[in-house]
Image (tube, rainbow, N blue to C red):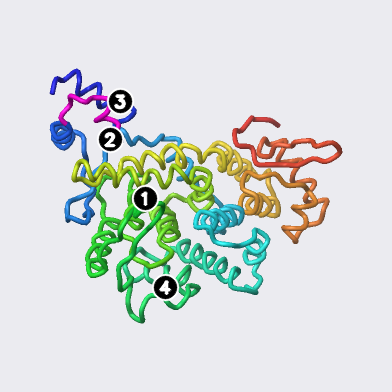
Amino acid sequence: MEAALYAKILSDKSITDLKKLKNKYPDVDIQELLELLKSGVYKAVPIPDFAGKNLVYMDNVAQVRMNSVKLLLTPQNANVAFGLKAMEDEIVSTLTIENIDFSRDSVRKILRGYAPADESEQRIYGLKKGLDFISDPVNEITEETIYDLYNTAIGEFLPEEDRLRPGAFYRHDSVFIVGQALEHTGLPHGKLSEYMSKLTAFINSDDGMNDLLKAAAIHFYIAYLHPYFDGNGRMARLIHLWYLKRQGYSSALFTPFSSYIERSRKGYYNAYSLAEENAKISGMMDVTPFLVYFIENVYNKIGSVLPQPDTTDAFRKALDEGQITEKERDLWNFVLSAYGVGEFSTKQLERDFGNAAYATIRGFVLKFEKLGLLTAQKYSNKVKYSISLHLHGRG
């Protein structure tokens, strides 16, 4: 293949869709193209496809913005393992993706510590326990802890026929994912232990792969293997967050990843399908379409739900300089956890925080607005506040 044509194909926006490439370049030998990609573009992911060959990806196509990495690495409140608002949105979205009936009021009720009253709230409670589980630094990612997470978050709340057998880590029979046509068959159940062992080895290896891409590859692989009769998507999303948390991305559990997936659900499922369709042509499981989906629809959009690092730095500077009281520090950390970048009123903060007089709340929001850490927005005769996403130095 001529170098100029090869370069043109590499830069084509359809590079992750082999069927489209075949239509655009009918004279190009796809097998020749694949050999060139294997020799200089594809990078191996050390987990096998169903034929035993390593997954691959194109790192020249799957590029994560450094700003996304910095935001996810930004430390949050050390005394809070996760953001309550992020947790609420994560649970709401992951259940919505799976078309599971629930109400947001029930999610809020369970997160406030109320006991579940029905089957729907039991499922919510399970996911809440699952997020607690992955936020605990004691829990490393192993086959045993994945089994514990599954039973804690999902397995205990499934119908009897969908549960794991006693002592079994994975399903004991075949599973098919069916849409308008048969879309995917999970790995034969007899191979699940071998493949999941390789996945956990990959998770815990220092292989030089970008952490955010690796998390997305892990996410893909759980759904690809489909180790359970039910709950595979929820587990894929939980383990994605768990891996990032283990790698030191402090803001991962302050970011409702599933909210972004819910908003782009068609693209999420299309990315899985595209990887499968490409594999039928190439004989290789290239996960680039799924990585690109996550970059474009999740990672590159997280700035809209997290304060920028300069906002966090400005808070620490004011705290170190003695401008902020202990109570104001606690209020700031509560706002970060409970509201994320959403709006709140002084009355709402007084009610939700529950341990400060209204005068203290009022003084807090005015001081933090002056510091540039909070932004005020007037609505008729009401004022609502939110965390400043981009710091404007004042005061």
Q: State how many labels appear.
A: 4
Q: Find disc 2 in the rendering and name its residue.
A: 19
Placement of the C terminus among the 4 image quadrants: top right
The secondary element bearing badge 4 is classed as helix
The residue furthest top is: 4
Q: Nearer the viewer, mark 1 or mark 2?
A: 2
Q: Find disc 1 in the rendering and name its residue.
A: 215
Pointer 2 and pointer 4: residues touching (CB < 8 Å)? no
Residue 85: x and y, percent?
A: 61, 53
Q: Is residue 61 magenta?
A: no
Q: Residue at x 27, y 63 (%)?
A: 196
Identify the magenta region.
18-29
Q: Find disc 3 in the rendering and name its residue.
A: 12
User: Which circle's residue, 1 or 2, is located before the other in the chain?
Assistant: 2
Apparent side of residue 283 relative to residue 388 in the rendered image (left or right): left
Residue 58: x and y, percent?
A: 26, 37
